[in-house]
Amino acid sequence: MREKAQKLEQLFADIVSCRVVVEQPAKHQQQGKPFNIHIDLGVPGKEIVVDRQENEDAYIALRDAFDAAKRQLEDYARQL
């Protein structure tokens, strides 16, 4: 997670904060237990939030969440 957060910081140096939450809510035993990833990025004047990534593999869920955060950060940087 730290490496992925550092890559975001290389993309946009003005990141003020980065909080990542990994959850595994209870599910039925037959369906598996997907991981939910929640990322809050604090940037000047805005907070970027990713809260929709789910996968039974934690690494895939993290990759997808950080990819979504990267896209949102790139959009924010273009707006500036």
Image: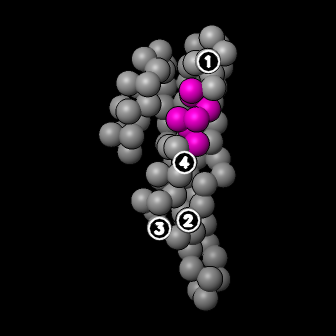
Residue type marked 4: Ala
In the picture, which quadrant includes the N terminus? top left
Residue 5 vertical position relative to residue 77 in the rendered view, above or below: below
Instruction: Out of 21 and 58, give the one closest to the viewer.
Output: 58
**Tag 1: Cα neighbours inside 10 Å, few (<14), some, or many (≥20)?**
few
Q: Are marks 1 and 4 in contact (CB under 8 Å)?
A: no
In this figure, which residue is indicated by the disc labeled 3? 57
Circle nearer the viewer, 1 or 4: 1
Residue type marked 1: Arg
- Give the mark nearer the N terminus: 1 vs 4: 4
Circle nearer the viewer, 1 or 2: 1
Q: Which labelled disc corresponds to residue 55? A: 2
Please tell me which residue is depicted at 60% across the width and 66% down the height of the picture.
25
Q: Which labelled disc corresponds to residue 5? A: none
Q: Is residue 46 left or right of residue 1?
A: right
* Distance Cα–Cα, label 3 vs label 2: 5 Å
Residue 71 vertical position relative to residue 66 in the rendered view, above or below: above
Residue 71, magenta (yes or no): yes
Secondary structure category for the residue under label 1: helix
Circle nearer the viewer, 3 or 1: 1
Furthest-left residue in this view: 3
Residue type marked 2: Asn
Secondary structure category for the residue under label 2: strand
Q: Are marks 3 and 2 in contact (CB under 8 Å)?
A: yes
In this figure, which residue is indicated by the disc labeled 1? 78
Please tell me which residue is depicted at 52% across the width and 70% down the height of the picture.
56
Rendered location of residue 2, percent (x, y): 35, 39
